[in-house]
Amino acid sequence: MAQEDIPVYGIHAVEELIKRRKQDIEHVYIDKDKRNQSLFNLMKICRKERLSYNMVPEIKLNHLAETKRHQGVVAFCSIKPYTSAERLQEIISEKEAPLLLVAASMEDPGNLGAIIRSSVAFGVDALLLERKNTVPLNASVAKSSAGMIENIEISKPRNLEGLLKELKEKGFAIAGAHASKGDLLPNSDLKGPMVLICGGENRGIPPYLDKLCTTFLKIPMSSKAQSLNASAATAVMLYECVRQRME
């Protein structure tokens, strides 16, 4: 966890955090050696609510909380509140041809920040993130976005796979960005309701999202270049989307 994130620690404080800002919790760390009912109940809540958590040694908690008075639990929240499921549905229903972007398995804060910046520039209606395997919305991401993080709706759906299946049934194209397979970007119709999925630096598009894609898109490029990095590829994809929609 990045040092600029502020930890919330203590059993009561973390319980209140889950009650009031559950959707904004990035990760919970629980002492793996301490045995008490309160910590066990917190772990069960994390499982039930699909919150990302790890069981770690006390020395790790001391480092994360920067104190030994953490009572065996430390949690971190996003620097910006995530868009609620209800608000996300409003955004989708308000637009004739919504453009949603899934930044999957993004591990580098600089890349995610750059993607946020491009999303604002090219009119993405909402950015969707996975609950796991994605860098948290911390100060590094905000800095890399050049302040644009405040100008876009960012959601971390409880069930991203289920949401995309629902959108697919409603007629959304689910387009996966791929380096070597699919239709060339300029030859694709990107004007309708669409979810664009861009994979991370190391994992690419995870299998559970890959199988939902109705089409794949690839960027035409020189044979001298094997690929673009995640944020550059996303920017090119989004530019083509907005170019076609402006026509």
Image: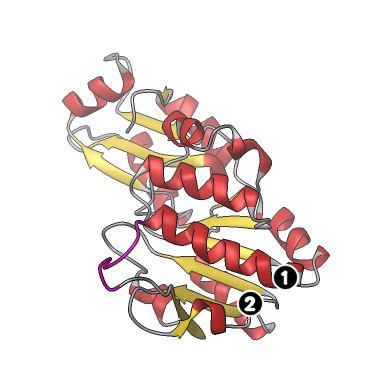
Coordinates of residue 103 in the picture (x, y in percent): 47, 58
Q: Which amino acid, mark 2? A: Leu
Q: Residue at x 41, y 26 (%)?
A: 5
Q: Secondary structure at mark 1?
A: helix
The relative height of residue 57 versus residue 50 in the rendered view (above or below) is above
Coordinates of residue 141 in the picture (x, y in percent): 45, 37
Q: Which amino acid, mark 1? A: Arg
Q: Earlier in the sequence, mark 1 or mark 2?
A: 2
Magenta-drawn stretch, dominant element (helix, strand or loop):
loop
Give the quarter of the image for residue 8.
Answer: top left
Please give the residue where the numbered disc 2 appears in the rendered image.
190
Location of the N terminus (image quadrant): top left
Q: Nearer the viewer, residue 72 or 241?
A: 241
Q: Is residue 22 magenta?
A: no
The relative height of residue 64 versus residue 152 in the rendered view (above or below) is above
Please give the residue where the numbered disc 1 appears in the rendered image.
245
Give the quarter of the image for residue 33.
Answer: top left
Coordinates of residue 37 in the picture (x, y in percent): 34, 37
The relative height of residue 222 versus residue 111 in the rendered view (above or below) is below
Q: Secondary structure at mark 2?
A: loop
The stretch of residues the image draws in magenta is: 223-229
The relative height of residue 212 versus residue 20 in the rendered view (above or below) is below
Coordinates of residue 31 in the picture (x, y in percent): 24, 33
Left or right: 63, with 165 as reference point: left
- Please rate how many residues cluster around mark 2, counting C-alpha atoms within 10 Å: few if below 14, some from 14 to 19, many from 20: many
Do the numbered discs 1 and 2 sit on residues whose CB atoms are within 8 Å? yes
Q: Is residue 245 visible?
A: yes
Q: Nearer the viewer, residue 32 or 36?
A: 32
Left or right: 39, with 88 as reference point: left
- Please rate how many residues cluster around mark 1, counting C-alpha atoms within 10 Å: few if below 14, some from 14 to 19, many from 20: few
